[in-house]
Amino acid sequence: MRKLALNDEILLKIEKPARYIGNEVNSVMKDPEKVDIRFAMCFPDVYEIGMSHLGIQILYDMFNQWEDVWCERVYSPWVDLDKVMRERSIPLFALESQEPVKDFDFLGITLQYEMCYTNILQVLDLAGIPLKAADRSDADPIVIGGGPCAYNPEPLADFFDLFYIGEGETSYRRLLDLFKENKKNKGTRQDFLESAAQVGGIYVPSFYDAAYHADGTLAAFTPNNEHAPSTVNKQVVMDLDDTYYPKKPVVPFIKVTQDRVVLEIQRGCIRGCRFCQAGMLYRPTRERSAERLKEYAREMLRSTGHEEISLSSLSSSDYSCLRELVNFLIGEFKGKGINISLPSLRIDAFSLDVMERVQDVRKSSLTFAPEAGSQRMRNVINKGLTEEEILNGAGQAFEGGWNKVKLYFMLGLPTETEEDMKAIPELADRIARRYYEIPKEKRNGKCQITTSTSFFIPKPFTPFQWARMYSNDEYIARAATVKHAFHDQLNRKSLKYNWHDAEITVLEGVFARGDRRTGKVIEEAYRLGCIYDAWTEVFDYEKWLKAFENTGVDMAFYNERERGMDELFPWDFIDIGVTKEFLKREWQRAMEGKVTPNCREQCSGCGAAGFGGGVCFEGKN
Amino acid sequence: MKARIKFRKYGVMRFIGHLDVMRHFQKVMRRAQIPIAFTGGYSPHMIMSFAQPLGVGITSDGEYLDIELTEPIGSKQAAEQMNEVIAEGMEVVSFVYIPEEKKYSGMTITAAAEYRVSLLKSSRSAGKIKAVPASWKEAAERFLGQESIVVMKKTKRSEKKVDIRPFIYEIEAEDAGIRMFLAAGSENNLKPDLVMDEFLKFAGEDPDKVPVHIHRLDIFAKNDKIPAETEKTKEKGTGLVTLESLGTIRG
Ligand code: SF4
């Protein structure tokens, strides 16, 4: 019978023991004697979140296809189990084998958002692995980070042996082969890191030194090891039809956030919104063929038994075979009791028609993400969505029976004025007015317009990477301005307004663009007891403030300073294909309120064409 | 047409709660391509109902769910197809066809359940079982010989006295554990842990200090609802038969 790392007494005491027992359908068991490499793949958040992540599923599937590798999953123990494990010194274990992570060859950690950084330390600590890479011995696993936050790995530089920059499908085989070779040659940890540093996309933080100017900005970032390149290149898969895809994803027993088959239809986005990091990081846009996706849909529904299928991409409406694919999914699966969910669709005649076919209009809501209230502001952020388009889309939907709308905006965008803030409730109100233009007998009761705002956080590798942020108080004041303006609207009874927390925003801001020196704040916050910072019921801002105070790191230096055009950034050693020149050009155009056409309308010469494929070469060969 | 599935739940699956077992079966139905019927509407769901939820930590040899089919499938074939795709720690034991009428559905006819409560060496592991003391054989007889067994039942609002004796049909100390046959279902559901606690107190033990593991052996229905020709499984003295025996195997 299957052995478990936790005993019955513990499992029956904690919340949701199913998080920790493994044994899920399609999870992979191997004979440890027959593999060369044990890889623990960690999503540093609770099981239900981690299990919902497509990227990890892709890598899990890829690793386990290789006979010499056994890849297992690790998630953060929830706070209840965290406490028990500390009290009883139970080492963190991987779900499949239930064996301690410390005995693995690799611990891979995906970096999806900044607010999971203390959970990384939790994972290392519970595993019994020294928090700092410098303190690890040959017996410890190699700790490797990847994912979107690895594009500015510097706040985490001390805690990782390696970072993998880019899409995981390309360089892992080479990296693991080097590891095996090094083991065979009885090489040291240092030997392996030196050979790894030469693999495309691999960054070994200990092989670089950072120097600072008197004003605190970065002066130089230079390799200190002859094997380390001065630039690390992002890895991309150019042919999405000829790569790994998890056709038998693990099926959790408990309900998780993404409890469905996910079809990744494309990577990248043609739109070029200036605040969006994913839109720049994943250039150029590459599509997967409809034929391949149909095949995957059939196979994955069959192997998982899921009752829902969903499309994944940054902007599904731009996928060139969308109609074909969606019609196929509805025709093939709708009659078999499979729900079809279509997120991130632009509202137009086609999407309304599709939505009507797949969901109950009365219960569902329309989603628009204009991101900014005024047209001027939308030009600044290059969001090509006009008020006319929103009102037309909403109007058509209202006539088709919808009466619920969700709107998403950002506050604190560069150049934002009070007028721009007030334009948010005004837009919401105009949508409501459009609804009430429909004769009473034809409409479906009152309408419900729900507006949510988050605070803008400048991210590395975006045209807004130079932008300043604001203080906690200033953010709250801006949200209050919006809230008051909502009270002044004609249809205020049909409008609802929610805003995000500002405390988490300022912390995210620091670590999004932070340098190596911010790492000690993370460590101090963890020592003070911070974990699960993305969870409002656990998050403790006071402790974070204390951590900044104790380490003497100034939040305002990272957040409230507009960066100089020639400033060297901590992430500048990474080449994502999109040039800094292009980003600068875009920042200037933003200041002038000029929009930039999308990749299909006209190429703006961002540099990503250097990868030799995707949208940049569409119809050109 | 209606089918009844009997399954076992053992090993690490004891940590999977009832709702998640239901979810698991929905996915098993799809993976195994069982021709199950759906309700109508925008979000159709499978027509399936479980006889009696099983608490987390408890294992079982006799769990049931009834399903509605759109076309017939051989009993053996259905069980095989499901077992190929079911999680380790679950096993379909039988797949039988039951009469259409509502009164045969597992939910409504459940009347009793049989359990074995074994003693553990420690609460840390359900795998290490201790033998039952010899003296408990006689204690069990005396326990059952009582005219009434009054316990305090806590509800959300109040506490009240209830006599559970009428709902204990059998209790017997065997080497492997205390076997008990208790009322179950919507009318008078008696939980085995409650009975065990009472029995331990009766035998002079502190229930908090005696770690146990509960295993359900089977679920039973009243005999009077059963057509004569299907009465073939062991019949309890109380006139009850297993839910399984109410169905027929089809090729
Ligand atoms: S090179 Fe041109 S087409 Fe290609 S991603 Fe950049 S802007 Fe778009």
Image: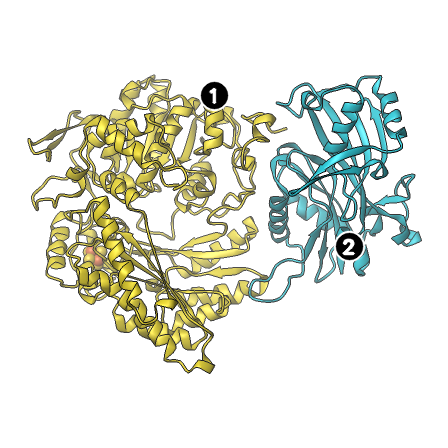
Chain colours: A yellow, B cyan
Which quadrant holds the C terminus of chain A?
bottom left
The chain to which mark 2 is attached is B
Which residue is more in the foreground, A221 or B137? Answer: B137
Which residue is more in the foreground, A266 or A380? Answer: A380
Q: Residue at x 13, y 62 (%)?
A: A593
Residue B249, relative to residue A325: is it above or below? Answer: above
Which residue is more in the foreground, A47 or A540? Answer: A540
Q: Is residue A413 shown left or right of residue A8? A: left
Measured in 3D between alpha carbons, the distance from the residue under mark 1 to the one under mark 2, in whole angstroms, is 48 Å
Picture coordinates of residue A18, whole percent (x, y): 55, 37
Q: Secondary structure at mark 2?
A: loop
**Badge number at residue A87:** 1
Among the 4 quarters of the image, the one containing residue B101: bottom right
Q: Which residue is mark 2?
A: B105
Picture coordinates of residue A177, whole percent (x, y): 35, 30
Which quadrant holds the N terminus of chain A?
top right
Residue type indicated by callout 2 = Ser
